[in-house]
Structure formats: structure tokens, C-alpha cells
Amino acid sequence: MQGFDVGDIPGYVFVPVRPFVLYCRESLERIEGYAKFALDDYNKRNNTTYQIVKALKANVDVRTYYITFQVKDMAGSGSGSPTLNFQAKVETFQGQETVLFVAPEP
């Protein structure tokens, strides 16, 4: 599994972006935690009630995670709503997470 397409990265890249394996529980929990952090930011800024269903794939460089994950809109029918894919770019540094990007997948 690979995370969402990263596209062109401007400037010199010292460490390439590479797939982040989601097969072990610890890795999956870490990625889903970052995805939830990003989605909480999205919900707050857009007055929405999306909830994470599961992480689909992820890429990472040294401290930036590129994550694709599924969500459901909990407004109205809640659990009966269709899933929607989201993408997030989350940077981690010295124990702090920063959402650089989060939006529905194009």
C-alpha cells in the first residue's frame, strides 16, 4: 500500500518520500491518530461531523506523513452514510503535530 500521490516536490530532497507500512497495529494506530488529528481540524474549520472509518495508505519522509483515509459523515443518517476518501499531510516534530493539508480526495 502506498499513500496518496505526492506529486512534484520543489527544491532539493535529502530524504525521499516512501511508503509507510500499515500492517502492524502500532503503525496503523499511529497513522490513524494523525488522520484523526487532521480530520478534527477539518471538522472544526468546516463545521462538519466526519469520523474516521480506517486508514487506507500512507507515505512518509523524515517527519511528514501523506495519508489517505476513509470517513463517514455522522450528521443525519450517521453510520448509514457512504464512505468518502480524504487525504491529509501531517508534519511531526519534537512530539508536536501540524496539519499542513486535509481535504476530500480529488
Image (cartoon, rainbow, N blue to C red):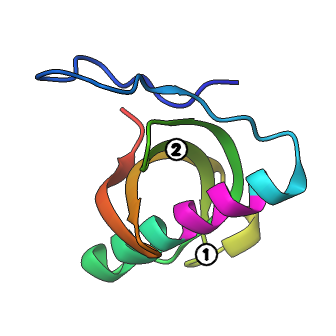
In the picture, which quadrant includes the N terminus?
A: top right
Q: Which mark is on residue 11?
A: none
Tell me the residue at 38%/27% (across/down).
Answer: 15
Does 68 sit above or below residue 76? Answer: above
Farthest residue, direction top: 8
In percent of width and height, residue 106 lies at: 36, 32
- Magenta stretch, main secondary structure class: helix
State which tag comes first along the sequence, 2 or 1.
Answer: 2
Q: Look at label 1 and name its amino acid.
A: Met
Q: Is residue 35 left or right of residue 13?
A: right
Residues rendered magenta in the picture: 29-36
Q: Is residue 74 magenta?
A: no
Left or right of 12, for residue 92: right
Residue at image coords 64%, 35% = 20
Q: Nearer the viewer, residue 13 or 99?
A: 13
Q: Element type at marker 1?
A: loop
Residue 31 part of the magenta-drawn span: yes
Residue 35 in the image, given as x and y percentages of width and height: 54, 60
Q: Is residue 1 above or below residue 26?
A: above
Q: CA distance from mark 2 to mark 1?
A: 21 Å
| Quarter where residue 2 is shown | top right
Query: Residue tagged by mark 1?
Result: 74
Taking the view exactly as shown, the residue that stands out farthest to the right is: 24
Residue appearing at x 22%, y 17% in the figure: 8
Query: Residue 67, which numbered label?
Result: 2
Classify 10 Å Cα crowding around label 2: few (below 14), some (14-19), many (20 and above): many
Mark 2 residue type: Ile
Measuring from the top left, give residue 24's x and y in whole percent. Answer: 88, 47
Name the residue nearer the viewer: 55 or 16. 16
Above or below, comparing residue 44 to residue 85 in the picture: below
